[in-house]
Amino acid sequence: MKTLLLLNGPNLNLLGTREPGVYGAATLADVEARFQEDAKRLGFQAECFQSNHEGALIDKIHEAGRRRAAGEVGGVVFNPGAFTHTSVALFDAIKGVGDLPVIEVHISNVHTREAFRHHSYISPAAAGIVVGFGVDGYRLAVEGLARKLSGPA
């Protein structure tokens, strides 16, 4: 059974307490538990990882690329948090590992927020993007990833 990886970037460990009017009341543990359930329902195993450190996220993407080549990992659901708007290094990591489908997800609609949030360095490397559906966006992302992995509709 292939694994789907959930990566969450900086400050997402504060879900449930950080700006609940923007991000809601669900905690990171809630998001991860739902991701595990959704992956299992779709026939996958799941692994979750959160870091406030760009290099740790890059290392996970590199590892996922190697595991994808070995047939172990299907793809990644990734909320890069604020690194979305700043990290060429994460873009390069995703592009550098080759055939690794990455679905970019954001809890809030970044396009209705501050202007600096309107640009994503990750989007051009992503296989799909889910924005603005709250934590339900993770479910949409994992379902979209599963569809991409099953081939053309």
Image (spheres, rainbow, N blue to C red):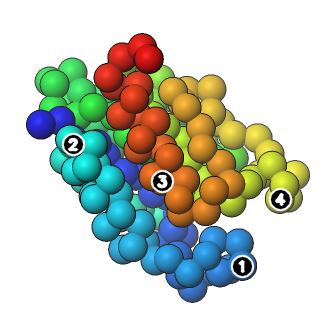
Taking the view exactly as shown, the residue that stands out farthest to the right is: 115
Residue occupied by mark 3: 138
Whether residue 142 appears in this view of the structure is yes
Mark 1 and mark 3: Cα distance apart in space = 18 Å
Q: Residues within 10 Å of mark 1 (few under 14, many from 20)?
A: few
Which label was assigned to residue 113? 4
User: For the residue marked with disc 4, what is the amino acid?
Assistant: Arg
- Residue 76's tag is none
* Type of the residue with mark 1: Gly
Residue 48 left/right relative to 7: left
Q: CA distance from mark 1 to mark 4?
A: 13 Å
Residue underneath mark 1: 21
Q: Position of residue 152 (x, y in %)?
A: 42, 14
Percent position of residue 99, x then y: 36, 19
- Label 4's element? loop
Q: Which residue is mark 2?
A: 44
| Sequence-first tag of 4 and 3 | 4
Sequence order check, earlier mark of 4 and 2: 2
The N terminus sits in image quarter: top left
Query: Judging from the image, what secondary structure is the residue with disc 3 in?
Result: helix
Comparing labels 4 and 3, the label whose residue is closer to the camera: 3
Where the C terminus falls, by quadrant? top left
User: In percent of the image, x 51 and y 27: which residue is there?
Assistant: 127
Give the Cα distance between marks 2 and 3.
15 Å
Left or right side of 144 for 3: left
What residue appears at the point 53 percent right and 59 percent down from the top-left corner?
A: 136
Quarter assignment of residue 2: top left
Pointer 2 or 3: first along the chain: 2
